[in-house]
Image (tube, rainbow, N blue to C red):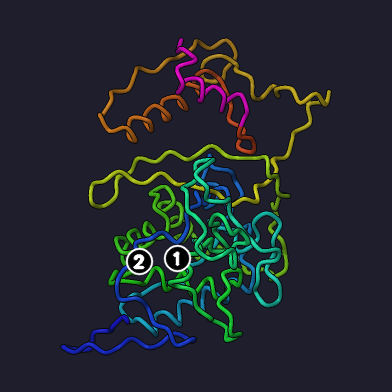
């Protein structure tokens, strides 16, 4: 049980609605293992677009109420946490676009319908291998675990932080009320002060072991804190919602930012299984050929301009860092080669160019 300091004494923290309390020790096991950017509806290439569309995508009224109630309840239960609803909302935006990923919507009870389920964590497609821990009760998979619900909880972590926030006698990760408060419980476990940037970073990194994820969540949080959001009717789908396409698998995000102890960050693992289909632009002939906008136009994308090459970046001896440097240089080089990245596609000529450079199949110049 968490405690709250009062002068020189410590008193037990107030109970949560279902009688549980905030864990006094920080939960280190991740709550989510998705890269988040895919769930946010933009693929994994340009996370800044999530921030840019934070207000235009809107927050369903049921989700907004759940986030704000989570702030009130958790700060009453643990007065040292100082959690804001905007941080919980930012995680909800990145993980599932507030329960609207893959065509799901929140119903009148705040439950994601249909339910949101991640990829099977079976060690393929960049995922970790996590054998079933819940008998398939939460994720409908009795062989492997899957992240579930609007806040994309792994079943094993949900078993620790899951709460009944709305008094319906259920702890349901698909229920935005339960999921939002469970996220608050997770973030406030331990002694971090979430009114500070350091506390926010540590808590969000525990939630998902990726510094790219941390940066994205905190940017969205700042946007919401500045008032850049709108409340919309609960049952309205996301404006840019796209039907699921199970064949689409985004490339993994590479991250090399070290954790606060100096260790290399863990590469982000799986994305939710309900992958958004990518709209196919019309080519006029209907043959699916390369668009003119995707073709190289000379150096810097300008017809007739000279080709520019970058010098080889030095190695650091740290594999994760060196891979990221190679990836960054490949992106720059393909841009200088004149390729244009189509953010709605994951296999356009730009992406193939990056892959060729990283695999050594393509030479600069």
Q: On residue 232, which mark appears?
A: none
Whole-number angstrom distance, CA of label 1 to CA of label 2: 9 Å
Residue 357 appearing in the image: yes
The x and y percentages for residue 134 are 53, 66
Identify the residue at horizontal 65%, vertical 47% (top origin): 275
Identify the residue at horizontal 47%, vertical 48% (top origin): 129
Judge whether 327 appears above or below 26 on screen.
Answer: above
301 lies left or right of 360:
right
Instruction: Report if the CB atoms under discs 1 and 2 are less than 8 Å apart.
Output: yes
Judge whether 99 appears above or below 347 on screen.
Answer: below
| Depth check, front residue: 145 or 305 | 145
Residue at the far left in the pictured view = 8
Looking at the rendered structure, the secondary structure element under dot 2 is: loop
Judge whether 149 appears above or below 9 on screen.
Answer: above
Judge whether 89 appears above or below 245 on screen.
Answer: below
Identify the residue at horizontal 67%, vertical 68% (top origin): 106
Which stretch did the figure color magenta?
A: 347-365
**Residue 357 in magenta?**
yes
The x and y percentages for residue 190 are 30, 71
Mark positioned earlier in the residue sequence (1 or 2): 2
The x and y percentages for residue 110 are 65, 74
Q: On residue 27, which mark appears?
A: 2
Tag count in the figure? Answer: 2
174 lies left or right of 20:
right
Which residue in the structure is indicated by mark 1? 157
**Residue 77 in magenta?**
no
């Amino acid at each position: 049980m968490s405690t709250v300091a009062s002068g020189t004494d410590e008193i037990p923290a107030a109970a949560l609605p279902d009688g549980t309390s905030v864990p006094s020790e920080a939960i280190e096991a991740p709550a989510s293992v998705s890269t988040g950017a895919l769930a946010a509806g933009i693929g994994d290439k340009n996370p800044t677009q999530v921030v840019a569309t934070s207000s235009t995508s809107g927050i369903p009224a049921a989700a907004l109420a759940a986030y704000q109630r989570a702030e009130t309840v958790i700060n009453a239960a643990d007065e040292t946490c100082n959690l804001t609803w905007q941080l919980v909302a930012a995680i909800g935006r990145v993980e599932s676009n507030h329960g609207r990923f893959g065509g799901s919507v929140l119903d009148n009870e705040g439950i994601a319908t249909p339910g949101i389920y991640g990829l099977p964590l079976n060690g393929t497609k960049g995922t970790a291998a996590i054998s079933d821990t819940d008998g398939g009760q939460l994720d409908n998979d009795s062989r492997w675990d899957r992240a579930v619900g609007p806040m994309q909880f792994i079943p094993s972590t949900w078993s620790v932080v899951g709460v009944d926030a709305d008094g319906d006698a259920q702890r349901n990760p698909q229920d935005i009320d339960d999921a939002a408060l469970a996220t608050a419980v997770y973030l406030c476990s331990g002694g971090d002060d979430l009114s500070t940037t350091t506390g926010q970073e540590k808590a969000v990194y525990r939630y998902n072991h990726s510094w790219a994820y941390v940066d994205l969540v905190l940017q969205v949080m700042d946007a919401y804190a500045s008032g850049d959001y709108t409340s919309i009717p609960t049952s309205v789908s996301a404006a840019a919602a796209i039907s699921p396409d199970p064949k689409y698998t985004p490339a993994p995000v590479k991250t090399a930012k070290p954790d606060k102890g100096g260790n290399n960050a863990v590469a982000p693992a799986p994305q939710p299984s309900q992958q958004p289909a990518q709209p196919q632009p019309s080519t006029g002939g209907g043959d699916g050929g390369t668009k003119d906008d995707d073709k190289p136009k000379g150096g810097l994308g300008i017809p007739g301009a000279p080709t520019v090459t970058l010098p080889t970046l030095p190695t650091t001896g740290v594999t994760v860092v060196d891979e990221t440097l190679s990836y960054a240089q490949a992106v720059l080089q393909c841009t200088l080669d004149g390729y244009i990245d189509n953010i709605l596609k994951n296999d356009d000529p730009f992406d193939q160019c990056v892959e060729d450079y990283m695999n050594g199949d393509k030479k600069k110049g």
